[in-house]
Structure formats: C-alpha cells, structure tokens
Image: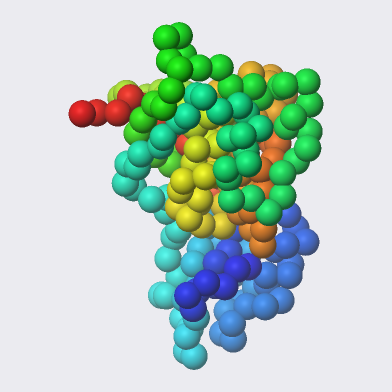
Amino acid sequence: MKTKNGEFVFGMGPGEKLQKACRRLPDGIDPREVIEWLAAGNNLRLVADVQISRSQIVPLTPPQEVFTLMIDYRKSFKEMVELGHYDDVNSNIFFEDRFRVKAPVGVKGIVEVEAKLFKFEGKYGCKMYSDQAKALIEEKAGWRISKTEHLLAFGAQHIEKLGYHMVVALDSPDLTFKLCIERDSKCSLDLNATAYDFDTFFLAFRPKIS
C-alpha cells in the first residue's frame, strides 16, 4: 500500500506485500473483501476518509492521453539508463549487452514518437503472457509494442504517469526476460519473465503525427 495525496493505493503484488497492506487498511474495510476484489481482477483506490464506504472504491485505470517520448540514439544503453529516475537498477540488464539499443537505419540523432500505456484488465484473468499483450496492442491501429529505448525514455521523462505499477517493454532482444520499470516503495529498472499480473501496463508507441 502506498499513501499519496490522501489516497490508499492497492495493487496485486506478492503475498507478503498484500498481507502488509491489509493490516494497514482504514477502519471499516474488511481485508477479506479487498482480497476478493483484487483476485477478481480489480485494481482499487481506497480514498482515505473518516467514514469510508464501499461506494468510495473505484478502479485505477492507466492514463488515457497520448504523450511524447524523445529518443536520443546518440546515447548508449548505459547512458539512457543513467537518465532515468530509478532507486534500483538490476545489474543483470548489462550482462553481455543483452538489451543494447540499435538505432533505426538512417537515424543518428533524436527521434520523437507518440506513446501510450495500455492495460488489459480482466482480458485473460489474473495473468497475461507477452504474446497475448502483443496481439492486443497490435489490434490498435498504428500502435506498436515498445522497445528498450522507449521504456528508458519513459523512465526519464514520464515516470509520474506510472503510479504504483509495473510497465513493460514487450519488444525485447532477450527471449526469456523483458525489461520493465516497477514503481512500489522504490522505483526499479528490472527484469521480468513473460507472464504478468492483471494490473501491469504495457508501453506502446507510434510515429509522431504532425
């Protein structure tokens, strides 16, 4: 549970985190109900109030707006990581240059793209796999799954849009793990396997529309 601007924010994380969150619930909320709501695929915001009621519980949804990312292909992968607002960086991301950034053919400088966070809550239950999320994004006209450089630009330029969630770059050169940013008590640049909880965000991009 995270507290920000008078709100109690919950997401389905590891069991230990969920137990701690439930122990700190405001008066009037039954932890068993919260667990049931989360297990049913809901991501909930409990608005702090003296008399809190079930009617004050609303779904958390990803930002709907399209935003801009500036990708600087003159920078190395390491330099892009260093621009991000992270408390922790998994050192394994640097192993054998596994997430190297390759500029598109003919590109040497800064590229501006449009980006958006997608979430497919309840589409496949409480878990979603990379290929399922990829197919759903590609159904959206013009949108493509993000690459390493898009995620790192997001971490440097728009981390506040993430809230307390995970965002994943699905277009990864690593077949086993995907690069992700997870914002909890800390903001971490990490690796994640190819199955995700229902409240994961997927970053997508498209060419900048003039």
Residue 62: % across, % down: 42, 50
Instruction: Give the colour scheme of this rendering.
Output: rainbow
Residue plotted at (47% across, 75% down): 5
Residue plotted at (78% across, 20% down): 96
Q: Is residue 36 visible in the rendered structure shown here?
A: no
Drawn side of residue 199 relative to residue 107, left or right = right
Drawn side of residue 96 relative to residue 4, left or right = right
The total of numbered circles placed on residues is 0
193 lies above or below 171: below
Q: Residue furthest left?
A: 210
The picture quadrant where one finds residue 15 is bottom right
Q: Which of 21 and 123 is in front in this view?
A: 21
The picture quadrant where one finds residue 18 is bottom right
Residue plotted at (73% across, 70% down): 20
Q: Which residue lies furthest to the top in this view?
A: 105
37 lies above or below 181: below
The picture quadrant where one finds residue 179 is top right
62 lies above or below 44: above
Residue 150: % across, % down: 49, 32
Question: Could you tell me which quadrant the N terminus lies in?
Answer: bottom right
Residue 208: % across, % down: 30, 28
Question: Could you tell me which quadrant the C terminus lies in?
Answer: top left
Residue plotted at (56% across, 28% down): 75
Q: Is residue 178 visible in the rendered structure shown here?
A: yes
Residue 64: % across, % down: 34, 47
Drawn side of residue 184 relative to residue 121, left or right = right
Q: Nearer the viewer, residue 181 or 27?
A: 181
78 lies above or below 30: above
